[in-house]
Image (cartoon, coloured by chain):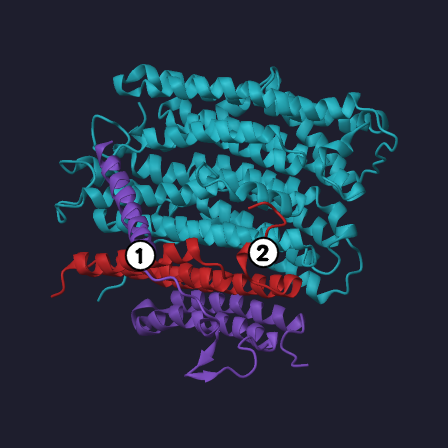
Chain colours: A purple, B cyan, C red
Amino acid sequence: MSEYLSVLIFAVTGAAIVLFTFFISKLIRPHNPYPEKGVTYECAEDAIGDSWIRFNPRFYIFALIFVIFDVEVIFLFPWAVAFGELGLFALVEMVIFILILFFGLFYAWKKGVLKWV
Amino acid sequence: MEFQLPEINLQLMAPEIFLFLWALAVMAFDVTTKRKSSSTAGNLALVGLAVTGVIMVFTDQGRGFGNMFFNDSMAVFFKVIFLAAAFMAIGSSFGLTHTRILNHRGEYFGLILLSTVGMMFLASSSELISLYIGLELTTIPLFVLAAFFKDDRKSVEAGIKYLVVGAFSSALLLYGLSFIYGLTGTTDIAQIRSILAHSAVAGFNPAYQESTPIMVMAVLAILGGIGFKLALPPFHQWVPDVYEGAPTPITAFLSVGSKAAGLVAFAKIMIMGLYDLYDPSKAPNDWGILVGVMAAAAMIVGNVLAIRQTNIKRMLAYSSIAHAGYVMVGMLALNSLGLASVGYYMFAYLFTNMGAFAIVALIEDRTGSCEIASYAGLSKTSPFLAISMTIFLLSLTGIPPLAGFFGKFYVFAAAIKMAETGSGLTWIYWLVGVGLVTSVFALYYYANVMRTMYFVETDSPLKVTMSPMAVAVIVIGVVGVVVFGLNPQPIVQFASDMPAALGALLP
Amino acid sequence: MVPISAYLILAAVLFGIGTVGVLISRNVIVMFMSIELMLNAANMVLIAFSRALSIADGHVIVFLVLTVAAAEAAVGLGLIIMIYRNRATINIDRFSLLKW
């Protein structure tokens, strides 16, 4: 139990130090807000337009489909390196793996995700 | 380099492979056909679950896949619970697929099946890698399912909260597991246990002499991760929100299937793997009392906060937190009765909770409301629903001779038996005491629902038309609660095979 | 050779940054990025131990964790787009229909 106690003491001390620093800086910092301080600027210029512009959400959907095939490579690469020793069984296994991934693509296709309207 | 392929025993994994392919087939069916009949996808999913159950009867027990997959009696027991939970969840969603889920039925049922596959893998994993993958395959489909009503703000909000909490907790769990791997040098749970048992002081690898504090951190991270999944305080805040917002059958599936999956993960990691850190005399880092405190907090928080809920889904959410606390009491009793009592408890909870949520789903389809007040006058218009609901609520309270009573009874009996064995274990008596006292609170809020159904007069009583599948689910629930309450012996027998799976571990 | 404790400390720092990010961030996407940071901290620990012990299991876990993280990110981004359409915000404070 004493082990847990030391963890607890660490946590409490850590939190206390942070709170203490906030308190100290609150005490000694000057408090002088004026309007120019709140102005947004980019590279010392006044900002033009809104920084929140909309991207077409289709970009996200394509990116998500890309993720399927991106991650596939993680498994393909070690398999390819060791292919000589692994032989036929691993080939069959990898074909099954890729078929399952293709099911995902087939599904997206059928849902009409791949059409750029 | 010599590569040696592990022995592949596909027959061991046949139920999981079948169910996985079936889930893909259900989705493919839905996208390729033009939705001729609204319930075909759901019926297909039910057939798939039934066939998986049949395949499981013919599947051997044993190890395979280089010791990563171990189909022992504990795995079989929990797989039955998972399959039944999925079956009842799908059975009670037919109302939804007629009214609200019009475009994505295949995904809905397919994702439930995929989540079930994840739970089954989890139950069979004997090793950290497959355990982690199983856990993720369980939860990721549930994120989507919780947010399944795309236009319902509450549902989407529930989904995103569940996603953040779920991803956070699995990261926490993984961080803990990575240290366990580092300190023991293996991912096999049985080997982890023997390494921890045989090093001079439990909790460090001789190669890293200073690592006991790291072990403490690892145990804390793992407890945090699993605590989130099991909704043990202080990691319980997400539960009421997610349960309220998610579609009702999914809430039911979360409360039974996902909870049982968390219990399996706990049993695998903490009890099978880190058993030797439990005994206060053996190690400086005893996690038992910490889990005990969390379980006590769960019983108190769940039962007290449930009292002031007006939404029945929220009330059942808090009650599920409390039930997680009761189950953990049995889990902490590491004797031969302990795990068996947990198994029996989950079995009783399966029938009770799935049945109760099936009724909630029926009434929500009808009225669009989950307020307890809208249950007024149910006994007049639909005596069948009122009586079934009463049976489920009494079982949740733990009134004999229903199944819920024996669940609590075995859990507490196992804990007391454990407390008698060791001098450092008197805190277990306190835990049992907390459990007994909080059960009284539970009676209060469950009785409130019964009072509303039977004695509150209303001008506009509910009229409920019932789909045959929903009635079937409710009947299964009632029969399960009553039959296994009157005659708990078969399930106890089935469940008491489980400790044998832990080998010589238990006294 | 760099001692293993260096890797572990780096991983702990990453994990801490991730945890704090999840707990104090208001933006769901930032929370998500912080969770990825936590997962990568765990990966770091696995790789470091795997190399120090010369057991390859750790590398295998990392592959699988990366895959799982990608799946989680895919689902997460999908849900975030959905909630943005619903609410026109991804500020977690605004998601208060259900009392948090």
Q: Which residue is mark 1?
A: A25
Residue C68 shows in this picture: yes
Dot 2, crowdedness within 10 Å: few (<14), some or many (≥20)?
Answer: few
Dot 1, crowdedness within 10 Å: few (<14), some or many (≥20)?
Answer: few
> Percent x, y for residue B236?
49, 40
- Label at residue C77: none
Q: Are marks 1 and 2 in contact (CB under 8 Å)?
A: no
Q: Which residue is mark 2?
A: C94
C11 relative to B293 in the view: left or right: left
> Percent x, y for residue B141?
55, 54
- Judge depth for marks 1 and 2 and give the one in front: 1
Task: Give the amino acid at mark 2.
Answer: Arg
Q: Are callouts 1 and 2 both on one chain?
A: no
Subunit of label 1: A
Q: Nearer the viewer, residue A11 or B491?
A: A11
Which SS class for mark 2? helix
Q: What residue is at 49 percent from the left and 17 percent from the top?
A: B436
> In the picture, which quadrant includes the C terminus of chain B?
top left
Q: Nearer the viewer, residue C55 or B438?
A: B438
Q: What residue is at 74 percent from the left and 64 percent from the top?
A: B33
Where residue C95 sits, quadrant-wise, is: bottom right
Task: Give the amino acid at mark 1.
Answer: Ser
Q: CA distance from mark 1 to mark 2?
A: 30 Å
**Disc count in the image?**
2
Q: Nearer the viewer, residue B283 or B402?
A: B283
Where residue B31 sits, quadrant-wise, is: bottom right
Q: Residue furthest right?
A: B459
